[in-house]
Amino acid sequence: MCLTHDELRDLARSVGLALVAIAHAEPFPGLADLLRARIREGYLRGMDWFDERRAETAADPRALHPTVRSFISVALPYWLPDIRPPDDGIPRGRIARYAWGRDYHRVLRDRMRQLHRLLEHRLGRPIEARFLVDTARIVDREVAVRAGLGWQGKNTLVIVPQHGSWVLLGELLVDIDLEPNTPLRPRCGRCRRCLDDCPTGALVAPYALFAPRCISYLTIEHRGPIPWELRPLMGNWVFGCDLCQEVCPYTAAARPADDPVVRPERLEHCYPSLTWLLRMTESEFRDVYRGRPVLRTKRAGLARNAAVALGNIGDARHLDVLEETLQGHDQPLVRSHAAWAMARIDFAASEPVLRRALDRETDPAVHEELERLLTDPPLPVSPSSVTPLRSR
């Protein structure tokens, strides 16, 4: 097919896709076996939708789209080093940087559709295509690595030259033969900073992420109570986590993103007030986070995470809002985590409140949490509990 790499890059840039590369659509050798092994070993526990049947499909693109002949791998950079939390005395949570802007699923799909139309016009023929972003039965990083967009880092993320891992990935599957790009040589070497700095130990080995311990999984995908042993390790993250990216040496080479769609429009999109998260109504939650990835965790999940974050900050001035949450929040999941936060901040001061709550609580799960707290309270906060905001 007569389309050069330079022509494709020019077309992609014209629709807002700064990074683009091509890969062939043959099956991915060994991927199905690796994914099956990860599933059986519990690495994906809690994500029941990713089963062994999905692993088979993910390893063979034609099982997903029979006519595919080439992948067009695209990436949207999102690194914004100029946005920092204000020093205003308000306890704030942290939202992972990829979720600061508009919902990237919609952004990338819309731009890939525009690219598709330009390709059809350029080649003078209809092109059967499919647009994938994160949720389809394909492993985005495998496509990006094969296409030479970047290489897989030891934190399992794709590292792109001049952008680090601060990129959002998508794939355009097409029924035309395009000249593939050359894959890049991995450049992590002996570095293991991402493994050593993961607070929960979710990166159990290079290129191996045990999802049930990952802060991103716990704050977004996990719907129930967060395991007690992991709560103190979560710092003040309320949606996702960036730590393994922030410590990566390639972060220092990342260019600031200049696309307005990845920029937050208000403080709640990046560093929300934790007390506000506990008090927000369903309508406030939907109004503030409409069209943004944070909606995925739901109001109850975000408020649950906020309670844990306040517990980890460990400031007795926040006991009042936690008591208010314990007494009146409509979600049992949030009440139980508010109780834990109170006990972690100051058990002696909180014990009478927790006992009164135990007498009137009707939800079995919250009742059980309160009984456990009163019998075996969590350890108090240590000075290193809150995740620092790293500088470059």
Image: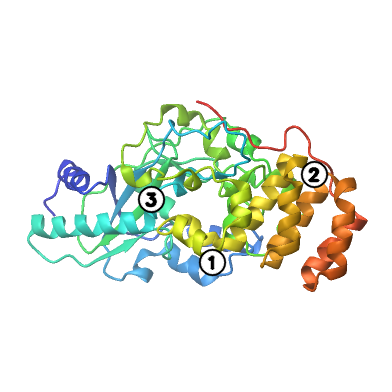
Q: Which mark is residue 36?
A: none
Q: Amino acid at mark 1?
A: Phe
In front: label 2 or label 1:
2
Q: Residue at x 35, y 37 (%)?
A: 257
In front: label 1 or label 3:
3
The residue labelled by disc 2 is: 345
Q: Amino acid at mark 3?
A: Leu
Question: Which quadrant is home to the N terminus?
Answer: bottom left
Mark 1 burial class by Cα count in 10 Å: few <14, some 14-19, many 20+: some
Q: Which mark is residue 50?
A: 1
Badge 1 element: loop
- Tell me residue 333's x, y (percent): 70, 64
Q: Nearer the viewer, residue 229 or 225?
A: 225
Sooner in the amino-acid sequence: mark 2 or mark 3: 3
**Distance CA(mark 2)–CA(mark 3):** 40 Å
Locate residue 155: give its quadrant.
top right
Sooner in the amino-acid sequence: mark 2 or mark 1: 1
Q: Is 79 on the left or on the right of 312, as rendered? A: left
Q: Is 335 on the left or on the right of 40, as rendered? A: right
Q: Is residue 297 above or below residue 57?
A: above
The residue labelled by disc 3 is: 169
Mark 3 burial class by Cα count in 10 Å: few <14, some 14-19, many 20+: many
- Tell me residue 9's x, y (percent): 20, 43
- Asked whether the residues under the numbered discs 1 and 3 touch, taking CB atoms below 8 Å apart as contact, a structural biologist would say no
Q: Amino acid at mark 2?
A: Ile
In front: label 2 or label 3:
2
Q: Nearer the viewer, residue 193 or 147?
A: 193
